[in-house]
């Protein structure tokens, strides 16, 4: 099984997780048979590993609420909607500016012919 997240998630390495991710619902594949979805409760880090504590996942027959992952292990976090919207608006604004500049140059050519 190869888990690649959903459209509403972006991939980060476990080593990139920080306190800003605590409280977010994350997902990851700790082994080839399991996919975990849970709310991040805490992070501990060493030079080689990241230890994740999840809220609301444990206490089941086969469910753990703590996982240790290598720093480069893929973890999926929610896409930051505000940052994405800001980026999209900036891109669109840049295109509008380019179009307006193009329209101005075409208008300049016509005035020379009068």
Image (cartoon, rainbow, N blue to C red):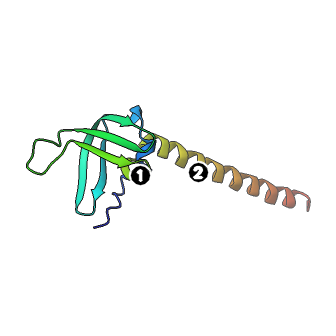
Q: Whole-percent x and y of residue 60?
A: 9, 46
Q: Position of residue 100 (x, y in %)?
A: 71, 52
Q: Quadrant of the C terminus?
A: bottom right
- The residue shown at (91%, 62%) is 113
Q: Farthest residue toward the bottom? A: 1
Residue 43 figure quarter? top left
Whole-angstrom CA distance, mark 1 to mark 2, is 22 Å
Q: Nearer the viewer, mark 1 or mark 2?
A: 1
Judge from the rendering whether residue 81 lies leftward or rightward of residue 113; answer left or right. left
97 to the left or right of 70: right
Q: Position of residue 86 (x, y in %)?
A: 52, 42
Residue depicted at x 54% and y 46%: 87
Residue 106 lies, in percent from the top left, at 80, 60
In the rendering, which numbered label is found on residue 10?
1
Residue nearest the observer in this picture, 23 or 14: 14
Please report the residue visible at 86 percent of the width from the left and 60 percent of the height from the top.
Answer: 109
**Residue with the mark numbered 2:** 92
Query: Looking at the image, is mark 1 or mark 2 earlier in the sequence?
Result: 1
Residue at the spot x=43%, y=49% of the render?
Answer: 12
In front of the other: 84 or 103: 84
Dot 2 lies on which element? helix
């Amino acid at each position: 099984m190869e888990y690649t997240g959903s459209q509403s998630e972006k991939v980060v390495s476990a080593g990139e997780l920080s306190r800003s991710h605590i409280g977010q619902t994350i997902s990851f594949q700790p082994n080839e048979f399991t996919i975990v979805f849970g709310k991040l409760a805490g992070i501990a880090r060493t030079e080689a590993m990241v230890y994740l504590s999840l809220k609301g996942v444990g206490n089941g027959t086969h469910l753990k609420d703590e996982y240790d992952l290598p720093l480069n292990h893929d973890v999926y976090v929610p896409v930051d909607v505000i940052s994405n919207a800001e980026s999209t608006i900036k891109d669109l604004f840049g295109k509008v500016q380019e179009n307006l500049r193009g329209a101005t140059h075409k208008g300049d050519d016509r005035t020379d012919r009068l």
